[in-house]
Image: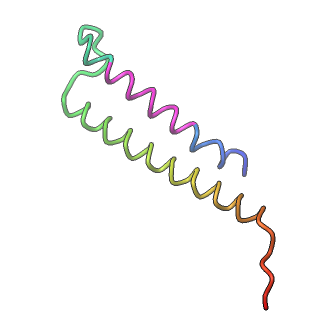
Amino acid sequence: MKRIREFLPHLAIAFSLGLAVITVLDGYNPLMAFLTSPASKAYIYCTCAVCFLTAIVCVYEQRRRRKKRRSPPREEK
C-alpha cells in the first residue's frame, strides 16, 4: 500500500501533463476533435491544475518526511 501511495502522485503529474498536451494539440488541430466544447476545456484545465498541485504537495510531504527520518536526533543541553 505504501508503494502505491508514493507512486500515485507521480502518476497524477504524468496524466495531468499528458492531458494538457492533448488540450494544446486540440487547439492547434480542432479537426481531430479531442475536445468539443469550451466548457469541457475549462473543466479539463481546472482538473489538470488541481491534480498537478495536489501531486506536488503530496510529493513535497513525502520528501519532507523522508528527510526528517534521515536527520540525526538533536542533542539537548
Q: Residue at x 26, y 10 (%)?
A: 29
Residue 11 drawn above or below residue 25: below
Q: Residue at x 37, y 21 (%)?
A: 22
**For this rendering, which residue is in front, 35 or 67?**
67
Q: Quadrant of the C terminus?
A: bottom right
Q: Residue at x 25, y 18 (%)?
A: 27
**Residue sticking out furthest to the front:** 77
- Does residue 5 appear to the left or right of 37 in the view shown? right
Question: Residue 74 location, x and y as percent?
Answer: 77, 78
Span colored in magenta:
11-24
- Does residue 55 appear to the left or right of 44 in the view shown? right
**For this rendering, which residue is in front, 76 or 20?**
76
- Based on the picture, tell me whether residue 58 belongs to the magenta stretch: no
Question: Residue 2 location, x and y as percent?
Answer: 72, 51
- Name the dominant secondary structure of the magenta segment: helix
**For this rendering, which residue is in front, 30 or 61?**
61
Question: Residue 37 location, x and y as percent?
Answer: 20, 26
Residue 66 drawn above or below residue 16: below
Question: Residue 41 location, x and y as percent?
Answer: 26, 31
